[in-house]
Structure formats: structure tokens, C-alpha cells
């Protein structure tokens, strides 16, 4: 792939400082770039690397004096980097059409330009929209509907009656629509509560690898437009995740939690059941959140508390031994003062 | 599915207040139910919803005055709900018989009315009991024995020599019998300790999605009758989980832990190796338990402590900054009193 | 399998005390061993079991007086046990050659004595080294290279362009080379940063079950020689894990973290992005590490602190209620002393 710098600047909406006629054949970090490649400066702390990088051009927010090559000045250099990387990304592998090994049940609808690899299983009355790709080992249960231009990666299982929108990506090994974890005690024994709801995943959602999104007990578990989840995330039955929210790796969300729009849940955080996380709230990594969080709040720790307070208490915890020591000293002094008094 | 209310009452062992001749065609929550559907009241805090629900009938512990439809009075309304939901649940999809695509090795025994979907692999000398279902992508290693009426969902891997009982459900993506994590140092290098034991899963166990249950180093990892695990649970080698215990999502249990009967491990809890969790003990979410827990105890936190104490200390942690401030004030006052004294 | 004790002693480099002519037909724990089996004593706390075990021989560091059978004296009895267990371990099942059901794309190179089970998919230009085994349900993307004598277990997905070395084991359900979790905000929406790097896994690495190792944004995510990971581990994009490091179950490592050689990360620990964990450092279970850790340091807790300090603070946390009480008492006494003063 070779492309003129001027073309890149146009695609990312940037302005060139320096020679705009050079040809670019790859993208790389400042450290690893070789001549002919473009790089980028996002974090200011790497600025001194501009003096030594071999990159032929860089993407940057403001012209840098310590760099000698061509510069694309972009208001949002990270976004410009993402768009430039898209130019050099290999297109996703597609199976050319529908594998003759496809095992398909009755009543399926398969759209145009669908790519179905070998070793895929489709249940009864499944619907696959135009341009969607199903990789090997994918299991699609009865009556599942998948929209257009979605990508279901290898060894993903989508169980019966679930609905997946357009432009959705589900990474390998994830399980959509397994039964929610609902039991009622009958003496010692746990009796399963039938999970007769479904999962609905809206457009532009991306689900990481080895995720588990459980079907609802009744109604639906609902992942709304634009949600992104990292790897090994657990989403229990009847959870609603609002638009454009981000769930970092190994997050666990318990049953019936309602997560608002543009929420960020940090890695390994756990959310207790039946609570609300308001729009634009942020939850710190490893937090254990047992109470609802108001919109826009930043909460960390177990139990959850305002993030600033969390930072303060966190730093104090390491000082507890010293603190106990000081308390002991105070107690002794008081005892002494008490004696002096008498 | 249509069924008379009287029939439902009979199936769940309840008594009808109001018209017992109505016909029910579905079950739903109080909020979402439409006429013709039955609903239920389990949590008393939703009682006021009875005045507005459109459900034609409800299941409830005691007759409610603010509800106008028919009522099934049940001693355990949650259990009655579970049984009613069972009536309306779709039966699990079965492949009609054994897929001609089945790849099967020598010496396998396959019982009556077994359903084996396409893309399943069975190793040598495997035994599959009557009525069991194997979904697509299932891998069954050599000499594995699976009992009757069990369901092995899509893309599950059960490795050689493991034993699975009757009425067991294993959800998609789970791995049973992978090698335990045992290494011994030989200088810098880690030498694998061969894991020559197995996994035994007894009757009525349900394993969630993307679980990992490792085979024993020697002997067996043992999941006893009636255990239920949620998603993404890790159970290491030589662990024993007692009857009817419940492991919530993302729990991790280290090697050689012995968990008693009717234990509950909260979500994301971690249990250190070689300890005992006594019968009916409960471990709070996200706890880190490094010492054995006596039967019936409720333990939370990292390190684990009695749950009541945990609640107290948890609430105090947020007050540490104030606490340090008060200590400083006390120290100053004492210094002053000391001076006054002299 | 029957083998003379003298042969075992020779294989493990030990010296026999007692009868060296006996024949051994299995290995087991002290509790479970029956006559004819060999056992071992590693943890001194089990020493009294030597008096009652039925094992015909034991492996031990120093001759024990309370044991009547033959003893193999070994400098490192755990290593000797590992080597002895290897004698009795069943050899790994192999498919005899390459399954005729193999679905294979153009340009693949397959070495000698490769074993490929049914239901495997190989993409374009894949290379599989001599003696490697691919289990059912394995997905290998385009241009992936796998070395010699490696074992890729059932339902593993290795995505395009990843490189796997020699003698590597990847346990079932793991996902290698899924896209890193990188997004940039464009208004409310998250725009994917194309992940155009790869994953490189060096020789002698063992990856547990249901792991996720993400491909790099640029360059490579790199798992170096001899690394061992337990189950359900998350390794984000651009992470480097140094030689012989050990990652216990459910660890999460964020993007661009550099982990040194011989590091141990305890179960459920979380490592924040862009930090360094120095050679031979140890991180306690469930820790949340947000700052770089120097070589050789032992760090625990959230936030991370020296392990000894962590143990101290941990024990103090349970005493916080008592501590607050004592502070209150001190305050009252001072108030009284203040009054007395006037």
C-alpha cells in the first residue's frame, strides 16, 4: 500500500507543514518507524522522540520544531492516527461466498454478499443480513437475526432468538444468549428459573473475546448502539447497557443493572444487581459498586466512593501502621497528662 | 401455548382467589405484562405496581387488595413463578438423532434418543447416556463418560477421561479437564507437573458459559451434585465443590480448595489454595479469602473478615481522611496541653 | 505401565534407601496411594502421613524414619515427583495424520508428523511445523505460523498473522490475536483504532484455557520464552511478558505494560496500562497495580504497596472500628483535660 501524504491529509482533515509530495507506505510508532512510514504524536511526554524518529512524516496537534520531516497538523491527532491506520490495515479475510460445508437448517434467510466460512452451524429460521461474515466454528441458534455488515468471529455461540444489529463485531469465543443465572431454593436444592427472554445487541456494538452476555429471565438483555466491551466481560440477565458505553476487560455486571449512555466501567470492576449507573458516570478499575451512581459521577473503590476521596483514602491506607502508632503515642501522653493533673 | 389458570395453580401447588376459569398465554413482569399474561410479586417493594399492571393474573404470597385480576396464592411465590415460567419456556432445540457429519472414533457407546448436532467430535471409547444433547462445536476427548439427559452446549471442550453425570448442563465455551496449573522450578525454568488426574461432575450440576474446570494433578477435581456456577468461573486442580453450592460469576478457586455443601461464593471472589470453606458458608463478592472459613460463617473483604465487621470497616475507610485530620488535631492539642503543664 | 524403582531413581537423579528391586505401577498422593504405587513428600506438614500411607515407595528430600517402604532421596523432591508423574502420564491423544475433513486454504505449509483433527480450519499461507497437533474446532487465520511440536487444543482461535513458536501449548478456548481494545472519541462515538500489529508467542510458552491475548495496535504483543499463564487471563495489546514469567488465573494486564523476566502475577491481579513490572518482581493476588514496580520487589494490595506493609495494613483494617473508638475516647479525655486546665 502506497499513498501520497497529501491524500492522507485530505482523508484525515489535516493540513501539511513541509513537503506534501512524499509517498507513505506504512504507519508505525515513533520508535519503530522507518523511512517511508508515517508516525504520530499523541501523548506530549513522547515529544523528544520527534528528534530521533526515522518516520518520514508525523501526525501532530501543533507544528513541532524538533522534527525535520513533513507534519500533518490535525485538531484531534489520535482520531487522525486511527483514520490513517485504517488506510494501511489489511482488509478482513472473507470466505468467498457460502461454504459448501455449511450446515443449515430449515427456513433460513441469507442476504447478499454474505460470507460464511466452513464449520458454521445455522439453526432454524435464522436470518443473516447483507455483507455479514460468519467465521469458522460459529454457532447460530434457532430464530437468531443478525443484521448487515456484521462480523461474527471464530467459535462464537449465539443462542436461540437473540437479535444482533448492523455493523456489529463479536470477537472469538464469546457467548451471547446463554441462560441467565437464576435459581430459587426448594429446600436445599436450587431450581432453575427458566430464562425465557433474549439478548438484543444494537448497531455498531463491538463485543470483545470470550465475553458472556446472558439472556433475560423475561424480556431482554439489551446492549445499545455503539457499546464497546473488552475481553472476558460478564453481562448478566436483564442488564441494559446504554449507548456508547465502554466496559473494560474482566468487568462483571450483575442481573438487572441499568447502565446509562457513555458510561465507562474500568477493568475488573464489579457491579451489584438491580442498581443504576447514570449517564456519563465513570467507575474505577477493580471497584465494587453496590449502590446506584448518579449521572456524571466518578466512583472508585470497594465500597464505591467519589474518586477524589478514593485517591485520598487509598494513599492513607498505606499509612495505617504509622497512624496506629501515633494513636498509641497520643494515648500514652494523655495517660501521663492525666496523672500530672492529679 | 395456552393454559387454564386452574391448571397453573394445580401445577405450582397454589390456591386461586378470583376467577379461576381464565386462560393464560404467557408470563411477564408486572411492568411488561399484557392482558392474557400472568405475572408475579416476589419483592414486596414492587407491591404498588399491582394497581397498574395489565396482567390477567398474578402469583403472590398473600392476597393483595390493590390488584383486581385473579391471584394464585403460593407459599413460595418465586418457586411458583419458576414452575410457571417452565410451562411457557420453549423446549430446548434438539438435533433429530445423530448428525451424519458426526466424526466419531472407535469404541464409542451412544445411548437411546441421543441428539448429536453437526461439527461434534467424539474421541475413542466415549460413552454418551440416553437422551443427552451435544451441540455443534463440542469436543469430547477419549474415554469421557457423559450420563443421561445432559446438555453440552456449543463449543464446549471436555478433555480425556472426565466424567459427567446425569441432568448436567454445561453452557457454551466452557472447558472441562484442561491441565491444572502446576509447575516446579528447575533453575529459572518452569517444568510442568503432569496432570494425570481427571474431573468428575456429578448429577444435576450446571456449569455457566466460558468456565474453566481443571483436571487434578492426581485423583480428581470434583464438582458434586447440584452445584451451579455462573459465567467465567475458574476452578483449579483438585478442588472439591460440595453439593448444592453456588459460585457466582468470575469467581476463582485455587488448587486443592475444599468447598462444603450449600456454600455461596459471591461474584469475583478469589479463594487461596489448600483451604477449606465450610458447609453453608457465604463469601462476599470480590472477597479475597486466604484462610479457611468455618461452616455457616459469612465472610467478606480482603483479607476476609466477618461480614458485619466488613460492613463496619468498609464504611470507615471513606472516613479515613477525616480521621487523620482528627488525629492531627488531637496531637496538636496534646502538645499545647503539655506546654501549659510546664 | 510398570517400571522398576531403580529406573525411576535413575530418571529423577535420586538415590534409593531400602529395597531397590520393587516394581512401581502408578503414582499417587500419600492418602490415596495403594500398594504398588509411589508417592512423595513435598510439604513437611504432611510428614506424619508417612506412617500410614500404603505407598510402596516415596520420593523425599531426606530419609524418613517413620516410613517403612523404599525411599528415593532427591535434592528437589517436587521436581523428582514431576518427572516421575511424567512416566505414568498417558501420552497426549493424536489424530493419525491429517483429517480428510480438514478445510484448508491456498498456500499452506504443513510439516512432517503433524496431527490435524477434524473440524480444523486453516487460512491462506499458514505454516504448521513438524510434530504439531491441532485439535478439533481450532481456527487458524491467514498467514499464521506455528512452530514444531506445539499443541493447539480444541476450539482455540489464532487470528491472522500471529506467530507461535516451538513446544508451545495453548489450552482450549483461548483466543490469540483478537483486536486490541483501542478507540478514540469522535464526539460521543467511539471510533476503532485499527489494530494492525500481531501477537508473537515464543518457544516453551503455555497458555491456559479461555485466555485472551490481543494483537498489537502497531508492532507486536510479545509473550516470551517459557511464560506460563493460567486460565481466563487477559493480555491486552502491545504488552510484553518476559521470559519464564507466570500469570496466575484471571489476571488482567492492560495495554503496553512491560513485564520483565521471571515475574509472578498472583490470581485476579490487575495491571494498569503503560507501566513496567521489573524482573523477578512478585505481585500479590487481587492487587491493583497502577505504578511501575522495580525488579525483585514484592508488591500487594490496591493501590500496590510493599508486601510486608500490605500484610500489616491488611490486619489493621479489621481493627478500624476499634481504632475510631479509641480516637473518640482520646478526644473526650482531651476535652476534659482542657477544661480541667482552665
Image: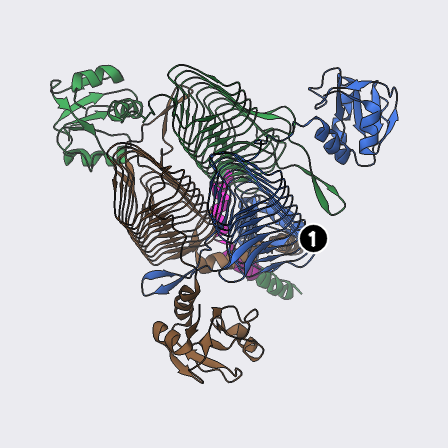
Chain colours: A green, B blue, C brown
Q: Residues within 10 Å of mark 1 (few under 14, many from 20)?
A: many
Quadrant the N terminus of chain A occupies: top left
Residue C100 found in image quarter: top left
Residue shown at 41% from the left, 30% from the top: A153
Callout 1: SS: loop
Q: Position of residue C135 (x, y in %)?
A: 40, 44
C319 vs C110, nearest the viewer = C110
Q: Position of residue C42 (x, y in %)?
A: 47, 71
Q: Residue B239: where, in percent of width, then height?
A: 56, 56
Front-lying residue, B342 or C133: C133
Give yes or no for residue A322 being in the magenta stretch: yes
Looking at the image, is B219 positioned above or below residue A6? below
Q: Is residue B335 visible?
A: no
- Range shown magenta: A309-330
Image quadrant assignment for residue B303: bottom right
Vertical relation: C24 (above or below) B256: below
Amino acid at each position: 500500500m502506497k499513498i501520497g501524504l497529501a491524500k492522507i491529509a485530505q482523508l484525515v482533515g489535516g493540513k501539511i507543514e513541509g513537503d506534501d509530495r512524499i509517498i507513505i507506505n506504512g504507519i508505525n510508532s515513533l520508535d519503530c518507524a522507518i523511512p517511508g512510514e508515517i508516525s504520530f504524536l499523541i501523548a506530549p511526554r513522547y515529544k523528544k522522540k520527534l528528534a530521533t524518529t526515522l518516520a518520514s512524516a508525523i501526525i501532530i496537534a501543533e507544528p513541532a520544531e524538533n522534527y525535520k520531516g513533513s507534519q500533518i497538523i490535525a485538531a484531534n491527532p489520535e482520531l487522525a492516527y486511527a483514520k490513517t491506520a485504517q488506510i494501511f490495515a489489511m482488509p478482513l479475510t472473507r470466505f468467498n461466498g457460502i461454504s459448501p460445508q455449511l450446515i443449515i437448517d430449515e427456513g433460513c434467510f441469507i442476504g447478499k454478499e454474505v460470507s460464511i466460512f466452513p464449520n458454521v452451524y445455522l439453526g432454524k429460521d435464522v436470518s443473516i443480513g447483507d455483507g455479514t461474515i460468519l467465521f469458522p466454528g460459529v454457532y447460530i441458534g434457532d430464530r437468531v437475526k443478525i443484521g448487515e455488515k456484521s462480523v461474527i468471529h471464530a467459535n462464537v455461540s449465539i443462542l436461540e432468538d437473540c437479535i444482533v444489529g448492523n455493523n456489529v463485531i463479536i470477537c472469538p469465543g464469546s457467548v451471547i444468549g446463554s441462560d441467565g443465572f437464576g435459581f430459587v431454593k426448594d429446600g436445599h436444592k436450587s431450581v432453575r428459573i427458566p430464562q425465557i427472554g433474549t439478548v438484543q445487541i444494537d448497531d455498531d456494538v463491538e463485543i470483545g473475546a470470550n465475553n458472556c452476555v446472558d439472556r433475560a429471565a423475561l424480556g431482554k438483555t439489551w446492549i445499545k448502539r455503539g457499546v464497546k466491551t473488552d475481553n472476558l466481560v460478564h453481562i448478566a440477565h436483564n442488564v441494559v447497557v446504554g449507548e456508547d458505553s465502554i466496559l473494560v476487560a474482566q468487568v462483571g455486571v450483575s442481573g438487572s443493572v441499568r447502565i446509562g449512555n457513555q458510561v465507562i466501567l474500568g477493568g475488573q470492576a464489579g457491579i451489584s444487581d438491580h442498581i443504576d449507573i447514570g449517564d456519563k458516570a465513570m467507575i474505577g478499575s477493580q471497584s465494587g459498586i453496590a449502590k446506584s451512581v448518579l449521572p456524571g459521577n466518578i466512583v472508585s473503590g470497594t465500597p464505591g466512593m467519589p474518586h477524589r476521596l478514593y485517591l485520598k483514602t487509598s494513599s492513607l491506607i498505606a499509612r495505617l501502621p504509622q497512624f496506629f502508632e501515633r494513636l498509641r503515642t497520643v494515648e500514652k501522653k494523655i495517660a501521663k497528662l492525666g496523672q500530672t493533673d492529679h
